[in-house]
């Protein structure tokens, strides 16, 4: 018996529905903790507690969660208006979210479009190795119109140097290795989660991802502001670190049908 997530796929007509069963959780190294998308961005860049609606065009509200939310009341979140969710699956090559199955399957079962994300630790192992760990433990994709491409969370180092001791070329290469391996394993380029400040400092112009990888950008304010180098538009904006839904508050840059098209690839 392994500790990898076990998956079962059932076919309803031409659509495959995949359910995920969680393994025993693995801990991170001693002295570390489970980091969620934006945990270090809020720490380094601050975050607004405003509840004012963002100034944006057509958008679909959504959320992202990790083990910090535990078992989520997905029916309540759906009733409150959330229509998509990203769920943390893994971190580095040694942590699996123990609540992943409840969160990933539960969001799907109430009707949401959902995807999984990985918190990257680029100084611990190479991008290919972390991509494999992610895909093996929940980061897959299926063309069912309800599953977003997997996402990689690139943000400030929780344990030390902001850019994990890597220069821009090396960091760009790490992201490229992760992205290419996820594409090879799943058929989709992963979404890249980051902030403009971190990305421009740690990757900058060393690598371009805007033509292939959807952008999920964190900026906690009523207005979006500049995007990271290489992208002309965002796919998802994480605009608030807490609010109506459990976890972080997000907006998809489009209407519900466009969101479904992103899921379809």
Image (cartoon, helix red, strand yellow):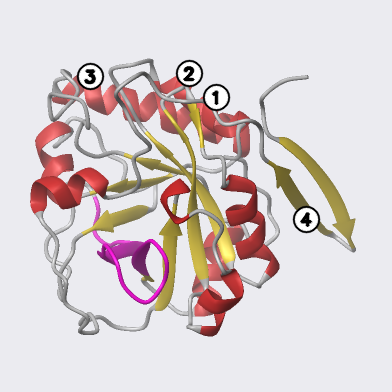
CA gap, disc 1 to disc 2?
A: 5 Å
Q: Residue at x 15, y 41 (%)?
A: 198
Please say if the residues under marks 1 and 2 sit with CB atoms less than 8 Å apart.
Answer: yes
Q: Which residue is mark 4?
A: 17
Residue 129 - label = 2
Q: Examine the rendering and report whether any part of residue 242 can be seen.
A: yes
Instruction: Tell me the element at label 1.
Output: helix
Image location (x, y in percent) of residue 8: 81, 43
Q: Residue furthest front?
A: 31
Instruction: Give residue 132's mark.
Output: 1
Q: Is residue 169 left or right of residue 14?
A: left
Which one is earlier in the sequence, the residue at label 1 or at label 3?
A: 1
The one of 65 and 57 positioned closer to us in this rendering = 65
**Residue depicted at 41% across the width and 25% down the height:** 92
Q: Between marks 1 and 3, how big is the CA–CA gap?
A: 19 Å
For disc 3, the marked residue is: 170
- The CA distance from mark 2 to mark 4 is 27 Å
Magenta stretch? 231-250
The residue drawn where x is 50% and y is 51% is 87
Q: Quadrant of residue 143?
A: bottom right
Q: Is residue 230 left or right of residue 91?
A: left
Q: Nearer the N terminus, badge 4 or badge 1?
A: 4
Q: Nearer the viewer, mark 3 or mark 4?
A: 4
Q: Secondary structure at mark 4?
A: strand
Is the N terminus in the top left, top right, bottom left or bottom right quadrant?
top right
Q: Residues within 10 Å of mark 4 (few under 14, many from 20)?
A: some
Report x, y in % for residue 166: 17, 19
Residue 248 included in the magenta stretch of the image: yes
């Amino acid at each position: 018996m392994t500790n990898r997530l076990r998956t079962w796929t059932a076919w309803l007509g031409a659509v495959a529905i995949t359910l995920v069963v969680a393994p025993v959780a693995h801990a991170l190294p001693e002295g570390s903790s489970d980091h969620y998308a934006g945990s270090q961005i809020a720490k380094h860049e601050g975050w607004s507690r405003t509840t004012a609606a963002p100034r944006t065009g057509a958008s679909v509200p959504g959320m992202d969660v990790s083990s910090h939310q535990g078992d989520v009341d997905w029916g309540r979140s759906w009733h409150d208006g959330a229509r998509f969710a990203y769920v943390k699956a893994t971190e580095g090559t040694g942590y699996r979210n123990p609540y992943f199955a409840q969160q990933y399957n539960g969001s799907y079962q109430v009707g949401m479009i959902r995807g999984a994300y990985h918190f990257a630790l680029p100084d611990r192992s190479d991008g290919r190795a972390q991509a494999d760990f992610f895909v093996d433990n929940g980061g897959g994709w299926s063309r069912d119109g309800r599953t977003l491409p997997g996402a990689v969370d690139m943000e400030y180092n929780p344990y030390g140097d902001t850019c994990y001791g890597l220069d821009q070329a090396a960091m760009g290469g790490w992201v490229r290795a992760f992205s290419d391996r996820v594409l090879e394993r799943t058929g989709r380029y992963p979404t890249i989660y980051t902030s403009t400040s971190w990305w421009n400092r740690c990757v900058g112009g060393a690598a371009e991802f805007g033509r292939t990888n959807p952008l999920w950008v964190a900026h906690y304010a009523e207005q979006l502001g500049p995007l990271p180098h290489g992208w002309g538009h965002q796919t998802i904006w994480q605009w608030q670190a807490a609010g109506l839904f459990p976890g972080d508050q997000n907006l998809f840059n489009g209407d519900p049908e466009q969101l479904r098209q992103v899921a379809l690839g």
